[in-house]
Image (cartoon, helix red, strand yellow):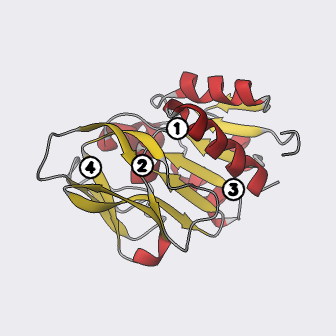
Amino acid sequence: MPPLKTLVTVIDYGGGNLRSVTNMLESLGCPYLVTGKKEDIENAAKIIFPGQGHFGQSMESIRVNGLAEPIIQAIKSGKPFLGICVGLQVLFESSEEAPGIKGLGVLKGQVVKFTSGKIPQIGWNRLKTTSNNSFLTDDYYYFVNSYYVKPEDEAVVSSYCSYNIDFAASIEYKNLTAVQFHPEKSGEVGKNTIKKWIVLYD
């Protein structure tokens, strides 16, 4: 693969899993900028939205920091965007984790809670990719989640996993990609996944 030269903008909204993501970008030799400034998001070439934590708290932080509209506009303008974990969930309209709190609503659908099995799901689970997938592999990735997304349009799903039920593990729509698992915690498979995503949009 060619050298990774394009600057990746990593959104710091006061939560998320920044250090693991930036460590992986450093190991790939990929230049990056960690920022919570809307002007940096507006000027970004590629965006990663790392996530870890509560849907409601994440959305509150996004809105308090004035980042909701810049994120939405960046996606609509065609900038390559990768959401991770909560960074996937906030793209949808609402979540059972935080009734009454709206998500970004970039995609139609809801976030719902697992109703069986040990909750949260913690550990490795294998993807089953769909024809909508561009860069993921049918490998094991690391998950920590009690909730999963239910897109209104299932055509955006790029992989599924099984955890007592089959659930959407990732989505892909035009320039927008997002994953429920943590590639930054998934060893070489995760590292190669992030590299493929970066190269895909070069």
**Residue for badge 1:** 50
User: Which numbered marker is on residue 180?
Assistant: 2
Amino acid type, residue under disc 2 in the picture: Gln
Amino acid type, residue under disc 1 in the picture: Pro
Classify mark 4: residues with Cα within 10 Å, few (<14), some (14-19) or many (20+).
many
Residue found 58% across the figure and 40% down from its top: 189
For marks 1 and 4, give the CA distance.
16 Å
Residue found 78% across the figure and 49% down from its top: 45
Q: Position of residue 162 (x, y in %)?
A: 29, 57
For marks 2 and 4, give the CA distance.
9 Å
**Dot in front, 1 or 2:** 2
For marks 4 and 3, give the CA distance.
25 Å
Marks 1 & 3, CB-CB < 8 Å contact: no
Taking the view exactly as shown, the residue that stands out farthest to the left is 116
Mark 1 or 4, nearer chain start: 1
Image check: 120 left or right of 44?
A: left
Mark 1 or 2, nearer chain start: 1
